[in-house]
Amino acid sequence: MKFRLIIASVMLAVSTAFGAIADTYKLAVTDVEGLERLQIEWGPFKNSLEAVTGEKFDFYGVNSRTAAAEALRAKTVDFVVSGPAEYVVINKLTNARPIVGLGRPDYFCGIIVRADSPYNRVPELKGQKIAMSDIGSTSGHLCPTQLLSDLGLGLGDFEPIHTSRNIGHEAVKNGDVAAMGTNHNSWLKVRNGDTSVPAGFFRIIGRSGDLPNDMIMVGEHVSDEVAKKIQTAIIENKDKVIAGILAHEENAKYSGMDLVPIEDSAYDYVRSMYTNAGFPQFDKFLD
């Protein structure tokens, strides 16, 4: 009898110990390639995430947005930090869902022209060259294309020139293109760093509303209970998590950020951008 009681007690103790061990979740960031960069740029965020949730997270390196989607579909990654345009496609391919929005202040796009240009309204740019960022960029391509359409300039009414923000800025300044559609805050840094002309050398003739947030999304295979637990812990301890994100200078774009609960419907505007750009299925990344 005593032997059986001892065995039962040991088994109970072992069971309890294993039950107390936290799960280990895999975490990816779509715009950071390589585990070394992940550790350096997002390590403080991972540490804060573990501290506020009581769970363990390991980084999962992805070398592309497609790789992130495949990892979610294969259930080899559980949580992914990504942007709005990437999310719309990943959601379509994997049914991943957003749980926390990384709210960025003044996250919108604008249409930039020279102050001495004859263009005062967007429709006046018909037939002109307009610089934009890489195809598929939320704030540098999809947003400007949607904004131009909203203001009366549809696809086919202008010639898009896809290039870097710095080159686009120079092209507007030199008159090589009539305008540039770009992330407003990112362009301000370029403009303010250009000492060859005053800031008033440029005008903005169109501005979008604030864009949907970057987000932390969770794979379809992760239970609602776990997703809610992680979401609640992040929101209730947002100051610590934000400090972790902002610890590295590569994440300076999130300066002034907030963390907010978020749902899939927040990204319907991005879906309209894809449709306007000629990709209504949302089932592939634009490269």
Image (tube, rainbow, N blue to C red):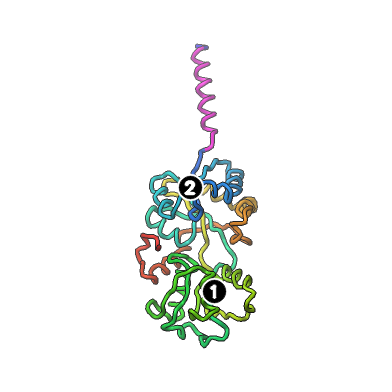
Vertical order, 144 against 116 (above or below): above
Q: Which residue is mark 1?
A: 169
Q: Look at 38% across and 57% down and name the residue there.
A: 92
Left or right: residue 107 compared with residue 128 = right
Helix, strand or loop at label 2? It is loop
Which one is earlier in the sequence, the residue at label 1 or at label 2?
2
Residue 6 part of the magenta-drawn span: yes
Q: Position of residue 215 (x, y in %)?
A: 51, 57
Q: Nearer the viewer, residue 12 or 14?
A: 14
Q: Position of residue 157 (x, y in %)?
A: 39, 80
User: In the displayed image of the protein, which residue is found farthest to the left?
Assistant: 281
Which quadrant holds residue 136?
bottom left
Q: Position of residue 266 (x, y in %)?
A: 48, 63
Vertical order, 36 against 8 (above or below): below
Residues rendered magenta in the picture: 3-22
Q: Nearer the viewer, residue 97 or 190?
A: 190
Q: Which residue is mark 2?
A: 61
Question: What amino acid type should be assigned to the residue bearing mark 1?
Answer: His
Q: Look at 41% across and 45% down and name the residue there.
A: 75
Helix, strand or loop at label 1? It is helix
Magenta: main secondary structure equals helix
Quarter of the figure with the C terminus: bottom left
Question: What amino acid type should be assigned to the residue bearing mark 2?
Answer: Gly
Q: Is residue 75 visible?
A: yes
User: In the displayed image of the protein, which residue is found farthest to the bottom?
Assistant: 118
Q: Look at 51% across and 45% down and name the residue there.
A: 59
Local crowd size for mark 1, using a 10 Å CA cut-off: few (<14), some (14–19), many (≥20): many
Q: Position of residue 182 (x, y in %)?
A: 52, 71
